[in-house]
Amino acid sequence: MGKCYIIGACGFNEEIDPQADDLVIAADGGYEALMKKGIRVDCVMGDFDSLGYTPEHENVTVHPCEKDDTDTRLACEYGYERGYRKFLIFGGIGGRLDHTLANMQTLLGLCRMGAESYLIGEGKIITVVENGSFEFSGKESGYLSLFPADGAVSGVTLKGLKYPLDNAELFSDRALAVSNEFTGEKALVRVDQGALYIMWYEDYREGESRV
């Protein structure tokens, strides 16, 4: 099974090259961004308040404006139902802050569904790990920050970074793990209990990026 690409309304400058077994979903205004780049669109869905019109496409799903979930969340569920377990979400950072936060919540939801997911844009990548670990290759540079995703987390260990941690606790009311730095070595983020958002800065290039 390939990857599920979801393109949101914020637009994106990253390079993507979906393969034949990948699924490309335009979530509302993401449709125009894909059209401008000449990238195929397998399906389009949303309430189309951002796009301003319903696209003429062979696979369109129109959602009501008044709904419980965001267009991005519904697009993820669509991909998940079709068997995809790796999600790359573009055009979901920037614009309205509440939408960015909602997309981060979607990452946590996908993690708890057993999927791997990344929110990519504006030179940064965000993912989430819960009761597990995440490794970096050593090619990364710049800053990395961690934020508890659902209350306090414990057993946090950081290796290969400028500021290591060993079996630490992180809390939602204190930004203890902001602006750590890559050192050029392989790095590890591990959490024994709880969920962590991992955010780092990287120019995303398909085939070169960590994801």
Image (spheres, rainbow, N blue to C red):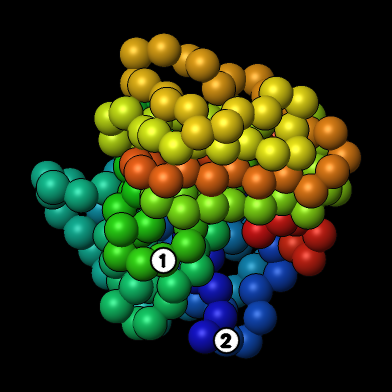
Residue 21's label in the rendered image is: 2
Residue 90 visible in rendering = no
| Horizontal and vertical percent position of residue 202 | 74, 41
| Residue type at numbered disc 2 | Asp
Q: Based on the displayed image, in which of its 4 quarters is residue 102 positioned?
A: top left
| Residue type at numbered disc 1 | Ala
What is the number of callouts on the image? 2
Query: Which residue is rendered at x = 72% and y = 50% of the image?
Result: 136
Question: Quick one: label 2, few (<14), some, or many (20+) residues within 10 Å?
Answer: few
Q: Which residue is at the front of the view, 18 or 145?
A: 145
Mark closer to the chain start, 2 or 1: 2
Residue lying at the far front in this picture: please name it: 167
Tag 1 secondary structure: loop
Q: Which residue is at the front of the view, 13 or 180?
A: 180
Query: Marks 2 and 1: which is nearer the front?
Result: 1
Query: Which residue is rendered at x = 24% and y = 63% of the image?
Result: 62
Where is 81 relative to 16, above or below? below
| Horizontal and vertical percent position of residue 20 | 62, 87
Where is 12 relative to 177, above or below? below
| Horizontal and vertical percent position of residue 70 | 27, 48
Where is 39 relative to 50, above or below? below
Query: Which residue is rendered at x = 32% and y = 28% of the image?
Result: 152
Location of the C terminus by quadrant is: bottom right
| Residue 183 falls left or right of residue 153 | right
Label 2 with label 1: CB-CB less than 8 Å: no
Return the residue at label 1: 115
